[in-house]
Each structure stands twice: as structure tokens, then as C-alpha cells.
Image (cartoon, rainbow, N blue to C red):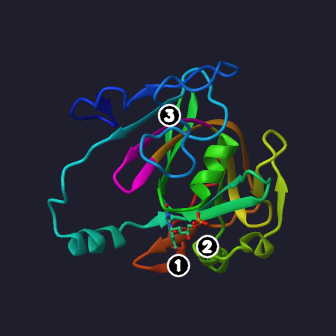
Amino acid sequence: MRFLGQSFPPLVPGILRRLSPLGGSGAPPGTGRDTGGGAGGVRDGASRPGDVGGEISMPEAQCDQESFRAALRTFASSVSVVTALDEKGIPRGLTCSAVCSLSMEPPSMLICVNRQNSSLRAIRHSGGFVINLLKAGRSDLSDTFASSSPAKFAAAKWYPSPVSGLPVLVADALAIIDCSLQAEIVIGSHVLIVGTVRRSETSPDADSPLIYLCKTYGSWASLEVPQNV
Ligand SMILES: Cc1cc2nc3c(=O)[nH]c(=O)nc-3n(C[C@H](O)[C@H](O)[C@H](O)COP(=O)(O)O)c2cc1C
């Protein structure tokens, strides 16, 4: 299998699964319905043609984890809050820096979510998610959504996305990208989630994004961003 330009060993038979079409008679034999973070990449909720879930087995750690953590701390990243709705229609979300654009045709995004994070279940249930790229100065909101607080959304103004109903953090986001869940692959502790973009929106405010580097929040102050790019 080739994924992100790398070759991986063949998958265990049946691990990479093509799920049943929407409206079909359910998941193919043996796939089951994952109820939250289980291995196999099969998720709650309706599946669609083209959905793929799977798990890639990885070798044991081959590096010193502390030096790996130290190296990762030097990666400056923007900070997003990824939102969805759970089975009861309650908004859920987590702070997420592992967010990147994946392709332009079709417009798609990639996020990486720890399997232990409870928002994963909501993303699977919703069959999608909204990436809310935080503005600079919203570190308190980032900390709230990185916590286990049951009342994260009390700290944020939000409205339902017009295309999906999923929570959009109206006042705090520089950009909003609403995605339908297209595929997921379990790798070790995390799930790589691919979303097809169904709507995107950019704030008219010329704010900097919130930046996270070496466990510290800041803004992109030293970069002159040209107008009309
Ligand atoms: C700056 C920052 C970036 C983070 N990025 C991620 C990420 O990319 N993926 C992830 O799974 N967790 C990430 N986290 C941790 C989650 O936000 C955290 O585990 C959260 O409590 C999960 O909430 P939930 O269990 O309600 O989903 C990040 C935390 C911080 C502070």
C-alpha cells in the first residue's frame, strides 16, 4: 500500500475495508461498527461510497521518545478547534494542531486525532467535522478545548454550519473548513482522518492565526503577509 508517498507492508487481510454504500444493508461481514476509538478504522454512522477505513501496523519505537518530543516542540504550528456533534446532538470539540491541507482536487483536509480523545466518537457519529482555525489571542480557548471540561462550548460563541449543522466558532476563527468524513486510517495511537471540504469561509478580519511553538502560544508577528494573495 502507498500512503503519503511511503510504502507500507501489506495490510492484514480484511483490515483495509471498503464500507457499504449509503442505504445499503449495513457494514460488510466482519467489519462491525466501531463505537469509539477502536482499532480498524470503522466508524459509527452512515457510510458512503468511497469510504475507506483501515489500520496500518507500525514497528516498535526505534528512537528515543524524549528527543522525538523535543524535536516536535520546535515545529511551529497553527492551532485549530475541530468540532462535531455527538449522538445526543451535543457539540464536542478538541484543540488540534495536526491539521493540514491534503489535496485541491478534490478539496480535502487531513487531521490526526488521538484514539483516546472523546471527540473522535463525535466526528465518527457526525460523519464529518469543522476545522476552526483560531485567531491569535485565543490561547484560552485552545486550552479549554484541550481540556476534559464537559462545558467547553460555554466558553465559545458558535452557530450551526449552514451545510452540516456542525459547530462553527464564529468569533474566534480566522478560517472555517467544514468537511465530510471521507476516510480514516488508524496508525498507532492516532487516527488519520481525511475530510472532503463542503464549505470554507475566511474571516474578514486581518488577524494572525494562533501559533503554538515550544509549549508557548504566540502570533505570526514578524511575517508581513501581502494583501490580496
Ligand atoms: C496546542 C495543542 C495541540 C493539540 N493537537 C492535537 C492534535 O493534533 N490531535 C489530538 O488528538 N490532540 C491534540 N491535542 C490534545 C487534545 O486537544 C486534548 O487531548 C483534548 O483534551 C481532547 O479532548 P476530547 O477528549 O474532548 O476530544 C492538542 C492540544 C494542544 C494544547
Residue 51 position (above or below residue 201): above
Residue 195 position (above or below residue 92): above
Left or right side of 70 for 19? right
Q: Please give the name of the residue rendered at 36% of the width and 27% of the height, measured from the top-left corner.
A: 14
| Residue 229 seen by the camera | no
The x and y percentages for residue 24 are 66, 18
Work out whether residue 150 or residue 197 is closer to the camera in this orientation and state it.
150
Q: CA distance from mark 1 to mark 3?
A: 28 Å
Q: Is residue 153 magenta?
A: no
Ligand 1 within 8 A of label 2's CB?
yes
Q: Please give the name of the residue rendered at 76% of the width and 49% of the height, measured from the top-left corner.
A: 166
Instruction: Give, as a three-letter code, the residue at label 1.
Output: Tyr
Q: Can you identify the residue that label 3 sits on?
A: 103
Left or right side of 203 for 98? left
The x and y percentages for residue 17 are 44, 27
Q: Which residues are magenta?
A: 181-191
The x and y percentages for residue 168 are 77, 55
